[in-house]
Amino acid sequence: MDIYVEALFNGLSFSSILILTALGLAITFGVMRVINMAHGEMLMLGAYAAVAIEDPQALPVLVRNVGRLLGQNWHLSQGLHLNLYWAIPVAFLVAAVVGYLLEACLIRFLYGRPLDTLLATWGVALILQQSVKLLFGPDLKPLSIPAALEGSWEVGDLTFPVYRLFIILTSVVCLLLVYVWFFHTPFGLQVRAVTQNRPMAAALGISTRRVDSLTFALGTGLAGVAGCILGHLYNVKSDMGTDYIVDAFMVVILGGVGQMSGTISGGAFIGTGNSVIAKVLGNEPMAKVLVLVVVIALIQFRPQGIFAPRERVYD
Amino acid sequence: MIDESTKSVPASAGPLRAAPAEKRASASRFSFGRGVVWLSLFLLLLPPLVFGDDAFRLSLFAKYLALAILALGVDLIWGYTGLLSLGQGLFFALGAYSLAYCLEMQEVANRAHAVPGTVPPGFMNYTNLPITHPDYRPPAALAWIAPLANTWVALTVAVLAPLVVATLFGLVTFRLRIRGVYFALITQVLLLAVFTLVDNQQPYTGGRVGIKDLADLQLFGFTFNSDASHCRELYWLVASVLVICFLGCAWLVRTKFGQVLTAIRDNENRVLALGYNTTLYKIFIFALAGALAGIAGAMYVAANQLCGPGYLDIAFSIEMVVFVAVGGRGTLFGALLGAILVNFGKTRISEAYPDAWPIVMGLLFIGIVLFLPEGVIGLLRTLPARLKPFLGRSRRAI
């Protein structure tokens, strides 16, 4: 029994990463009807932002490689050596800025062409992956967590790693912030209006351009936070985004778009499902297959999302 | 007023005449007969002449042509019907693995001087005992794949397996009118599920390594492989399969059936309102695209002599969409051209600058979508009209 409780707990921490990643995806899909295939790379950028400020070796390498690409002989003797608490806001900012630029330079030209956006953002994903590989080097980047978050709590026979508790806590805080922003600020109201009926919101004087770019930046920023947390859990590598992006898509498919509750239930379902089934079967890949198949099967009953509220669909 | 650009281009100007605006949406975009002649000459004669007996280049070209078959399927489903499937790699892999099992069993049987189908592939026989050893027990999975040892059975399965899987999957998704981005994502989920399965089930699929050391494909008394002695046969085989598939597709999109497909792409609700059962159309074309991918997979394995879970990579399934986008979606010739151009470019650029290829590929994705949504074919078609102000007199297209 104990191992299942622990699996559930690990699943919850995985779920919270997944929810953070998928929330941005779901909001942008709800607001703009586009799927951002480069969303996984925002995760990766968040993790690399953490590497850049935590690993003293990383910034000098980055500066040298950028210099080499520009034909200059740049040199930086000392990098930054900050910790996780700094890395989280930095990861958010880096991913949000990149997301903002992505929306401003590419995605806004592709409105109304969701499938083309999918292809173009996949191109962005390829470029980001390869650029990071060229700039930071192709090797894995291990990150260490602060001493306060190491170790685990023992409750009876159960062991709860502190860092996983921290992950859940951070996600809850992020979700609360998004909730407040979404439901208790004038801008959140505008976002919800655009999600529900874009032409009408525009007619009432809401700047849909501003809503689009800021929600997009927020979504990618959340993915950056998720990537930063994830990078401290496993290694950081340039293709780490692709491992999680399909899971995040499934959360969106399951949870529907445009509302937080669906994403949270979808993420919790997939994350804990994965982890608990993996324990039962003793085989992680097979658990993943099973969850994927269950998702495909569930979609048969509610194509607009299992946890999505029923609503009329217009074409 | 009559559009100047269309008036100036005579209808018989060439295989790629500029279609009048009102015909843009129609399924065929260039003269059927001429296009085919042009295509067959170009495809069948050019590479063997250019590369001669350069086995490496010729077999590379055979691979491009196999991928062109795949692109035809992607074009039917995406370019003509407007359904973006990101799971075509699954059907490609079904075809590829069918033939790979077959050639692997022939190879191990040849080595053991036994009948094909009685000797398990190396990855299944984990005890590594020869079949003559008294302790040898055939693995249970061998009974399942033994029929594939016959090349014709394997080739049939390579077409039928993707056909059946695509029909079943199409049945459940299209019946619910799942479309657009949802369809793309669900096919991707399916692909990832199968990839994880194949990758994980090493005793049955060869796992991450895949299936290596394949026998040469032998049909009609010919041998097909990428050695200098048989690369021409290989090339001709893939090229003829491609031409047959191309002709079939070209015929299909010219029929009323093909026009309904285009109509579904342009406005499905209207087609529904006209009384067509669009679900059936979509299932059919999805199954057909799957079968084409299966054929392509089998041909690719024959040329590559190696089969692995890389075919189930998410990236590969998106790349093949770009073949079609580069050439020109909604034109079969564009799919073919795009597959060859992109893969040729990939080989050349990766050889010269291995680090640059992903970035070039990424820029290609973005550039095509932003600036050339109609692909190379679209560019060629509008080129006469665009150049006209500079040339001063009417020109033939191409």
Image (tube, rainbow, N blue to C red):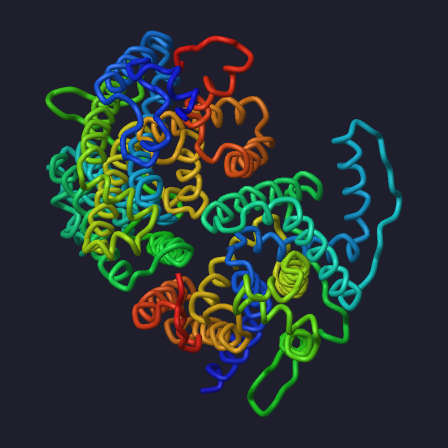
Residue B287 vs residue B156, the one in the foreground: B287
Asked whether residue A232 is in view, the answer is no
Which residue appears at 69% of the width and 70% of the height?
A187
Residue A34 in picture, x, y percent from top left = 51, 55
**Residue visible at 35% across and 56% down?**
B179
Q: Is residue B17 above or below residue B48?
A: below
Q: Which x, y percent locates residue A310?
A: 40, 77
Relative depth, front residue between A302 and B263 = B263
Seen as rendered, the residue at the extreme bottom is A156
**Residue beneath the point at 40% across and 31% down:** B328
The quadrant where residue A150 appears: bottom right
Q: Residue at x 16, y 20 (%)?
A: B222
Q: Quadrant of residue A269?
A: bottom left
Residue A302, placed above or below residue B258 = below
Which quadrant of the figure contains the C terminus of chain B?
Answer: top left
Left or right position of A23 against B44: right
Q: Quadrant of residue B335?
A: top left
Please provide percent x and percent y for residue A313.
39, 68
On the image, the x and y values in percent for residue B31 come to 26, 21
Which of these two is toward me, B139 or B384? B384
Vertical side of B59 occupied by B52: above or below = above
On-image quarter of the N terminus of chain B = top left
